Image: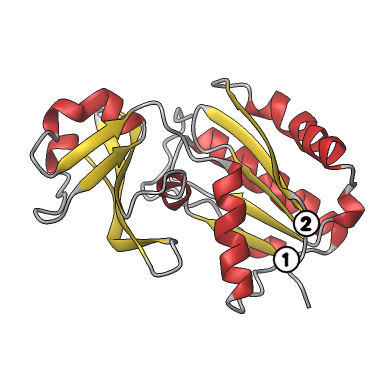
Amino acid sequence: MGLPRFLAMDTATEACSVAVSTSAGVVEAFIVAANAHSRLLLPMVQQVLDRAGITLADIGAIACGVGPGGFTGVRIGVSTAQALAMARGLPVYPVSSLQALAATVPQPLVLAALDARKGEVYAGVFGQDARGIPRLRGAEKVCAPEAVDWPDEGQWWGLGTGWHAYHAHWQGPRILGWSGDSFPRAGAVLRLAQARCQAGDRGILPALLEPHYIRPSLPEET
């Protein structure tokens, strides 16, 4: 029995993206448009379905980037994934947005960092496994950039908006390079969910899907 057809989304950063799996590969829509996710997400879902020549009735599972990231953006993605999954009775696969960021490049060792505002970053250290899947080493955390404890061995690639904002704190001989305009993408969320499904993970009920904030949300936080 083959894998279900996945619909995936990530709205945890300034980028909004949606992807769907097809027999020919992955169809993805991606745009950087801060504070527009609530307006863009559902039309982008319809866009990728139309491009793939399918409807929601053809979807067998939904994957969602659950953060860490902007609180409002994460909530939009999670609530949309829940609503679509509940309407069709589909399983949901929550995916770390930092892991999805690390999965956007074919680098074996990735230092993922997203600008968390308030002078902080969301950070995670990832190394590829034998299947090329980025696996978290230690724990994801939110902290001041100077408090990030990057590994002192190996050769690493930096990814994410945190590098654009704070790369001066992290330069060193073990940093091969960095990209500060990289974002988590729905295509990566989809591939990570597919790998879990292939390994026997059946996902979770939509009602159990929750944002992965790391730090508590404040009333004025977006």
Question: For residue 182, which numbered disc appears in the image?
Answer: none
Q: Which residue is mark 1?
A: 91
Tell me the kind of residue under disc 2. Ala
Q: Residue at x 78, y 37 (%)?
A: 48
- SS assignment at label 1: loop
Horizontal side of residue 10 vs 115, given as left or right: right
Q: Quadrant of the N terminus?
A: bottom right
Q: Relative to 105, does residue 47 appear above or below in the rendering?
A: above
- SS assignment at label 2: helix
Nearer the observer, 31 or 64: 31
Q: Residues within 10 Å of mark 1 (few under 14, many from 20)?
A: some
Q: Can the viewer see residue 60 in this picture?
A: yes
Q: Relative to 126, does residue 122 appear above or below in the rendering?
A: above
Q: Residue at x 12, y 33 (%)?
A: 171
Q: CA distance from mark 1 to mark 2?
A: 7 Å
Tell me the kind of residue under disc 1. Pro
Q: Which residue is mark 2?
A: 85
Q: Residue at x 43, y 45 (%)?
A: 68
Q: Report if the CB atoms under discs 1 and 2 are less than 8 Å apart.
A: yes
Q: Relative to 208, does residue 114 appear above or below in the rendering?
A: above
Where does residue 137 sit, x and y in percent of width and height?
A: 28, 63
Q: Earlier in the sequence, mark 1 or mark 2?
A: 2
Q: Can the viewer see residue 118 in this picture?
A: no
Label tally: 2
